[in-house]
Amino acid sequence: MTNAEFVSRILNTNKLLTKDGHISRRHVLFAGRTKAKALISQRLDEFKLMNDQSIITSIKCFELESVDWTDCNVFEFKVCENIMKSTKKLPEIVTGKIGSAVLLVTSVDGSIIYDEISPRSFKNLQSRKYKIKTEDFYTIQDGYIVLPNSTNEIINLDVIVLDKYDAMQVAGCDCGEDCDSVWDMDFVCPDVHLETVITSTLQEIASIYSRTPKDENPNMDENQKSQTVR
């Protein structure tokens, strides 16, 4: 189901497709995404969504650049020979109690899989008597991906985001047909829970609509909505 199809279903079911359009399409989409986000966040904590390909977005060729440790704001990386930081912020990623839904970070050819690490844990690794490899880690700082002890300029990510359009805008590779408008993008929600999200969104929108004064004069100016034609 695309974002456009989701919104149309809500509006049609509520018979909200009036000439005056009391409820905007963007408001309906926002309400639906809010419901989906709460549900996904809960399920994420229960480790039940990691393999649900229908809600995973792949960001290809996410670009990074070499920076000084002061530019990534991670003091623990001061000892690193080189630090790579993404040139763009990550899109808004769904989060749960276990953290953000960044499911996979790899080199473009897939030969390296990066594991998430906190700055404190990275410091503990550095302080060990017997050093271990510290090139295959990443951390997220202020919305940016940071790779310590790396020179890799491009990575791929699998994430769970509600706005796939935003995710496509930060991808470095040509997204082809995936670069359609936000309305043509998939509405992100596990199929098994889609009807639940639709129902709860319908209830919220219907509640808002029931409190909106009826327009007795369709297509009239907003200031004339309460007037009646004599």
Image: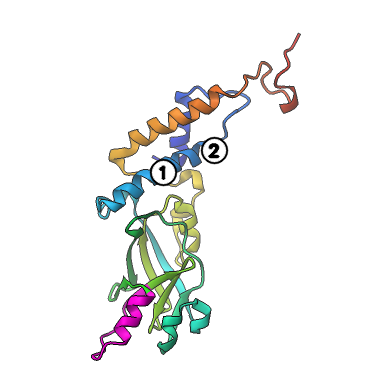
Which circle's residue, 2 or 1, is located before the other in the chain? 2
Residue 41 in picture, x, y percent from top left: 35, 49
Q: Nearer the viewer, mark 2 or mark 1?
A: 2
Residue at the location (43% across, 33% down)? 201
Residue under pointer 1? 187
Residue at the location (40% across, 32% down)? 200
Tell me which amino acid carries mark 2.
His
How far is disc 2 from disc 1 in space, using C-alphas? Answer: 14 Å
- The mark total stands at 2
Residue 4 in picture, x, y percent from top left: 47, 38
Q: Is residue 36 above or below residue 109?
A: above
Horizontal side of 185 relative to 103 (left or right) equals right
Instruction: Confirm whether the magenta stretch covers residue 128.
Output: yes
Horizontal side of 192 relative to 89 (left or right) equals left
Residue at the location (47% across, 31% down)? 204
Residue under pointer 2? 27
Q: Is residue 160 above or below residue 89?
A: above
Assign the N terminus to one quadrant of the image: top left
Q: Is residue 18 above or below residue 138?
A: above
Residue at the location (31% across, 44% down)? 190
Start and end of the magenta stretch? 119-138
Disc 1, SS: loop
Tell me which amino acid carries mark 1.
Phe
Disc 2, SS: helix
Q: Which mark is residue 224?
A: none
Assign the C terminus to one quadrant of the image: top right
Of residues 174 and 185, the one drawn nearer to the viewer in this rendering: 185
